[in-house]
Image: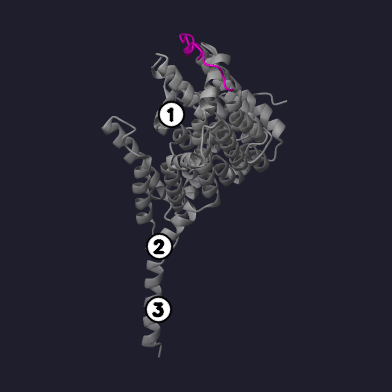
Amino acid sequence: MGIIPDKYISELFKGIKRKQTEDDRPMGGLLALSPLLVFLAVYLLSSIIAQDFYKVPISSAFLIASIYAVIISRGRTLEQRIAVFSEGAGNKNVLLMIWIFVLAGAFAATAKDIGAIDATVNLALRILPGKLLYAGLFLASCFISMSIGTSVGTIVALVPVAAGIAEELSCGGMAGTFTSIPFITAIIVGGAFFGDNLSFISDTTIAATRTLGCSMADKFKTNIRIVAPAAIAVTVLYVCLGSSATMTPDSAPIEWVKLIPYVLVIALAISGMDVSAVLTIGLAVNAVIGFCGGGLTWTGFLESVGGGISGMGDLIIVTILAGGMLELIKTNGGLDFIVNTLTRRIKGKRGAEFSIAALVSLANLCTANNTIAIITTGRIAKDITREFGLDPRKAASILDTFSCLIQGLIPYGAQLLMAAGLAQVSTITIISHLYYPFIMGAFALGAIIFRLPRKYS
C-alpha cells in the first residue's frame, strides 16, 4: 500500500541528479560579463605595470579571458562549451572580417612595394601643406566614409597613406607626438566613424532606421544636428594643432601611374562595390603595375602578398578569440542581464533616452560590432520609444551615435584592429589620440541632457 518500487526510486534520483548537473539555464548577472573585465584587467594592468602598451599582445589577453569564459560557463560539458566558443569564432560576420583582413594585408603590402604609398604621400603633402594637413586628412576621411558607408573600407584606403605621411614628417625632422603614426592614424579613424554614423548606405544607419521605423532622411537631419558641432570642433582643433607645422613637400616628381591603386579603390568603394571585391581588384591592379613597371617579379609579388597576410596574423587571431568569447557571454545571459537591468527603472523621456544609449553601448561592448549591437537592442529601444513618447528620429540617432562611439573606443573592435594592423601600432596608442569619438560622445550626452534638438523639421 503506497509502496514505490525500487526501480522507480532509482530512476527518480537519477532524474534529480541529471537536472542538477545538466542545468543549461544561463548564469546571467555580472558573472556572465566578467570575461570582458578579465580581458581589460589583464591587458590594461599588465601594460601599465610594464609602462609600455607594445609589450603586451592583445591576443594574449584575449586568450586568457577566453579560457576563463570557457571555465565559468556552467550547465555544459567542456566539449559543449568549446562548441559554443567555436560557433562564435566561426560566425559568418567574423569570417567575413577575416577575409577582409587577409585581402587588406595583401593589398597594403603590394601597394607599398610598387611605390603607391610613397606617390600618394607626396601628392597629399603637396595638396595639403602646413596648417591644413591634419584638418584636410580628417575631412577627407569624413567625406569618403560618408560616400562608401563603411568605416572599415575608409580605414583600409587611407591608413597606409596616413602612416606614410607620418614617416615622411618624422624623416623631415618633425618627430613628435603630433607627427607620430598613432596620431595621424587616429585622424583617419575618427573621420571614418563620422561618415559611418551618417551615411545613407551604412549598415548602422539602415539597422537603426528600420528598427525604429523612421526614414533615413529624417534620421540624418536629426543626427547631423548632434554630431556636426563635434566634427566642426575637431576640425578647428586639427587646424590649431597643425598651425606650428612647417612641412616641406617632397621635391621628387609624383609618379601618377602609381596613384592608380588608391584612386581606384576609393572610386570603386564610393560606387557601392563590396569591400572584398574592391580589395581584390586593387590587388590585381598592384600586380599589373608592378609587373609592367619592373618593380615586382612573380616571385616578389607572391612574397609581398604572403608578407601582407602574415602581418595580419595577430589581428586574425584576436578576431577569432573575441568572437568566441563574446558568444559565450551572450549564451551565458550577459546581454539579457544588461537589458533587464537598464530597462527596470526608467523614469521620464530623458531617462528613457539615457537607457537606450546605455543599452546599445553595453551591447556593443559585448559584441564588438555596432551593427549587431543595434539589431540586438533595437526592438527594446522601439518599445521604450513607444512607451515614453520619444521621437523615433532621435531614438534612431542615439542608437547609431552611441554604437559608433563605443566601437571607436574598444581595442578589440574591427576598425581599430584594422587600423593598428595596417599602421603597425598598438590599438591603445591610437585610442589615446582619438579626439572625434570622445567629443562626439560629449555632444551626444548634451543632446540628451538638454533635450536637443528641439525642432526636427
First in sequence: mark 3 vs mark 2: 3
The residue at which mark 3 appears reads as 12
Checking the image for residue 430, the label placed there is 1
Q: Position of residue 437 (x, y in %)?
A: 51, 27
Q: Quadrant of the N terminus?
A: bottom left
The residue at which mark 2 appears reads as 75
First in sequence: mark 3 vs mark 1: 3
Q: Are marks 2 and 1 in contact (CB under 8 Å)?
A: no
Residue 170, can we see it? yes
Tell me the element at label 1: helix
Q: Nearer the viewer, residue 362 or 118?
A: 118
Task: Give neighbour class at mark 1: few <14, some 14-19, many 20+ (Cα, 10 Å).
Answer: many
Q: Nearer the viewer, residue 42 or 137?
A: 137
Q: Is residue 29 magenta?
A: no
Q: Depth-wise, is mark 2 or mark 1 nearer the camera? A: 1
Q: Depth-wise, is mark 3 or mark 1 nearer the camera? A: 1
Tell me the element at label 3: helix
Residue 451, can we see it? no
User: Spatial distance from mark 3 to mark 1, Cα to Cα?
Assistant: 60 Å
Image: magenta residue range: 240-255
